[in-house]
Amino acid sequence: MTKITTNMEKARDFHRNKIRERRKSLLEELDIEFLRALETGGDTSTIVSKKNALRNATRTLGIADATNLEELKAEWNVSILGPSPY
């Protein structure tokens, strides 16, 4: 009997694409907040930090090092991306 295995490279790519899909709308919202803060002379440092965290979400070592689907799914950072799609 043939054992079914997961192609982890494809799974990592799929996971990164899910992150990209989710962060697109989040970055758009933060862009609006950033512009409003600039217009009013407000502090933008928190907004910039959030945007950088979203940009770096696909580059975590945990994604690259995941050896199975459970480890990969655990790399969804709910604190910056919201609820997991899995």
Image (cartoon, rainbow, N blue to C red):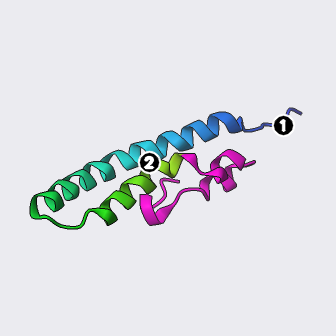
Depicted 2 relative to depicted 55: above or below: above
Q: Residue at x 48, y 63 (%)?
A: 78
Residue 70 shown in magenta: yes
SS of the residue at dot 2?
helix
Q: Residue at x 37, y 54 (%)?
A: 51
Residue 1 shown in magenta: no
Q: How many marks?
A: 2
Q: From the viewer's side, name the closer residue of 46 and 28.
A: 46
Give percent across and percent down for residue 60.
59, 51
Disc 2 crowd, CA 10 A, few/some/many (<14, 14-19, 20+): some
Amino acid bearing label 2 = Arg
Q: Which residues are magenta?
A: 59-86
Disc 1 marks which residue? 3
Cβ atoms under marks 2 and 1 closer than 8 Å? no
Q: From the viewer's side, name the closer residue of 22 and 54.
A: 54
Q: Residue at x 63, y 39 (%)?
A: 11
Q: Quick one: label 2 or label 1, which is nearer the N terminus?
A: 1
SS of the residue at dot 1?
loop
Disc 1 crowd, CA 10 A, few/some/many (<14, 14-19, 20+): few
Give percent across and percent down for residue 67.
75, 48
For this orientation, the residue located farthest to the right is 1
Disc 2 marks which residue? 55
Depicted 33 relative to depicted 12: above or below: below
